[in-house]
Amino acid sequence: MTIVKAHGAEIPALGFGVFRMSDAEVEAVVPAALEAGFRHFDTAQAYRNEAALGRALAASGVRRDDLFLTTKVWVDQYGKQSFAASVDESLDKLKVDRVDLLLLHWPTDKVAIADQIERLNEVQAAGKTRFIGVSNQNIAQMTQSAALSRAPIVTNQIEAHPYLDQSAVAAAAKALGVSITAYFGMADGAVPRDPLLREIGARHGKSAAQVALRWLIQLGYIALSKTARPERVAENIAIFDFALTDEDMARIGTLARPDGRLVSPPGLAPDWD
């Protein structure tokens, strides 16, 4: 498994995300993910399945030190009275003493970024997470977060797939030493059906989905894969035995379009770069 390094964090470049998955789905698929070789798992308070992931990981017998576990604090917990308590609740559900990476899930103007970052630093200093980061921040917010934080911001988790050009954010992150974690890599089902990705995949003996994940990895991103079907898990992780050519990478890059963004919830989404 390829590792992405950022400010001392060593993050497995391919993670397994459980967004929009029921408890039953999580508990059915996580054992298959572990069997296939996944060790990086990504959840969030807002997904409402931290407890299911915690149960599945605890029951697996896999050593805690071999796992990289990420969760995210939801925006309604950013207040001074609730932030640390919400993290404690997440840890209880996940059945761990600390997570490896704790993120602010979305930016909000209801709590100043300086206060959000201060609370992240406080829970990190208290030993409740090894590393801290942000999610869904634009360049200005990410730059401000990095400048304000005593502990390094190690990632910005953002939507990234072939139909959305995130090169500007990625370049700004690189300049700050911040990694990019890519979610929604399948573009809500568009990727597996894409003729170009299928054509490139056929040449490599791979699926369109594997091509898209490999493309994200070769861009230097951390990629979150997801499936609720245990029989599909092995396909998701089988992306380290081939490489896309420079021409492949360039052709995939041509798929980006101005309306390619899929995740932009009103009231949460910032002014995107």
Image (cartoon, rainbow, N blue to C red):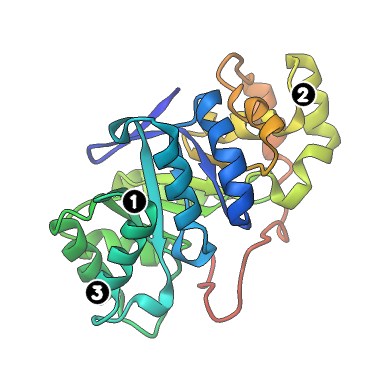
Mark linked to residue 76: none
Position of residue 87 relative to residue 33, above or below, is below
- Crowding near pointer 3: few (<14 within 10 Å), some, many (20+)? some
Residue 64: x %, y % from top left? 31, 36
84, 261: nearer the viewer: 84
Residue 222: x %, y % from top left? 47, 38
- Residue at left 78%, top 47%? 190
Whether residue 273 is visible: no
What residue occupies the far bottom of the structure in this picture?
Answer: 110
- Residue at left 38%, top 44%? 69
- Crowding near pointer 2: few (<14 within 10 Å), some, many (20+)? many
Whether residue 63 is visible: yes
Q: Amino acid at mark 1?
A: Lys
89, 127: nearer the viewer: 89
Mark linked to residue 95: 1
Label 2 vs 3, first from the N-terminus: 3
Mark linked to residue 200: 2
